[in-house]
Amino acid sequence: MRTVLRAGLLAGTCMAAAPAAAQDADVEQRLDRLEALVMQLVERLDAQKGQMESQQAEAVAATQQALAETKALQARQAELAAQIDEPKKQEDKGFRVGNTTISYAGYVKFDAISQRTSGGQVDSGNIVRDFLIPGAIPVGGDGSGWDTDYNARQSRLIFKTATDVGAEHTLNSQIELDFMVTPGGDERISNSYEPRLRQAFITYDNWLFGQAWSTFQNVGALPDSLDFIGTTPGTVFVRQPMIRYTSGGLMLAAEQPETTVTTPAGGRVLGGDDTLPDFVARYNFSGDWGSVTAAGILRNLRISDDDLGSDGDSAIGYGLSVSGKLALGERDDLRFMGTVGDGLGRYIGLNIVNDAALDLDGDLDPIFTYSGFAAYRHLWSDKLRSSVAGSYFKADNPVLLTTGAVTDESWNVFANIIYSPVRPVDIGLEYMYAKRTLENGTSGNLQKLQLSAKYSF
């Protein structure tokens, strides 16, 4: 660079004036000064470039830190928004007292049911005429005609509270009532029925205390049916008191124990001295494709010497259930459940069989069962939808202990069409066929046609 500068300046000087020896020294001095200035400029530029690169690196680091802080703030804001979202939703339907929002929800449902049974008559007022109970389908008798009943017993009331205890914690509660499976007036005059407790629980942050759906049951997989449950033979269905911890998709619970036992005479006895809770572990997976749940249960089945006149005994019960709801395009979904285990009796199909049988020595023999269902729902339009479903239950009863008069298997199928003229209202028609078979081969079936109208609020 120095050589180029000298050559350029020398050429310019030579063109501007005639060459003279006296001027050579002056030109050299000018060239030296110019070269020094240029070098200083180059060094300054290099220093500025290094400073700019350092400033740019610092700016990038600061930007990345700011983005991280912004994301953390957004996540915290989303968490806080989620915490206050439910109280806001409840406030839309309720009122506020101090720091507590009190709200309500539920539905009014009318059912017109006509059914017949091939194995015997079901008496008027019997709950078997209100919804499917597989273990109570009559067998071995004369067929009935078509019996028709109207009722509004499934109508439900839900009361909720959400209390503001600061941004770091959440405190909620829920009490739920309906009028199913309760005594009261008959069909002659008043059709009055007593309310019953369905759910009653408190939630504090990740903890739940109270009566709720069993953690072993996935309510989100239940089919879209007019019958109270729909696919009852293949469904885990239990509500009971518990302590539950939830973290993300993980749920851990200690739930109320209760052992149901089949006696050598074929009867059912409830053990009154359970000591350990039923332990449940569950994980929920979800995405745009739908949701899947895997749940396991461990039980201590127990009877004492004052239950059946024996010396008492205990046995291990266990089970695994996989269930879910899968999106099949924009208008269809598939709901399913599969459950297998030993000593699960009261958890499956409204206690189709018992948890265990009692042998001649007074020892418990857990009863192995497997069951499941699948339900396909299609939306014909925004106001019209249909579901078809089927379920199955099978028990491996120790027949020498239970006799042949206990249920060996049960299954059912149904299809419906439901119309929603406006969003909160459903009007539907459903046909169901169900069958129950005993270990001795005796069987009976149930056919049901149901018309329902439901208004959710």
Image (cartoon, rainbow, N blue to C red):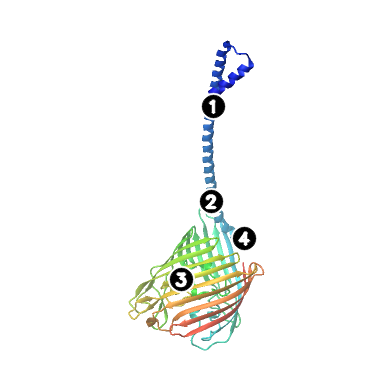
The mark nearer the N terminus, 2 or 3, is: 2
The mark lying in front, picked from 4 and 2, is: 2
How many circles with numbers are drawn on the protein?
4
Tags 4 and 3 in contact by the CB under 8 Å rule? Answer: no
What is the x, y in percent for residue 218?
50, 67
Q: Badge 2: how crowded within 10 Å, few (<14), some, or many (20+)?
A: few
Q: Which residue is mark 4?
A: 92
Q: Which residue is mark 3?
A: 339
Disc marking residue 75: 2
Tell me where residue 340 sits by quadrant. Answer: bottom left
CA distance for labels 4 and 1 = 71 Å
Q: What kind of residue is marked 1?
A: Val
Q: What kind of residue is marked 3?
A: Thr
The mark lying in front, picked from 3 and 1, is: 1
CA distance for labels 3 and 1 = 79 Å
The mark nearer the N terminus, 4 or 3, is: 4
On screen, 225 above or below 440? above
CA distance for labels 2 and 3 = 37 Å
What is the x, y in percent for residue 286?
52, 61
The mark lying in front, picked from 2 and 1, is: 1
What is the x, y in percent for residue 328?
57, 66
The mark nearer the N terminus, 3 or 1, is: 1
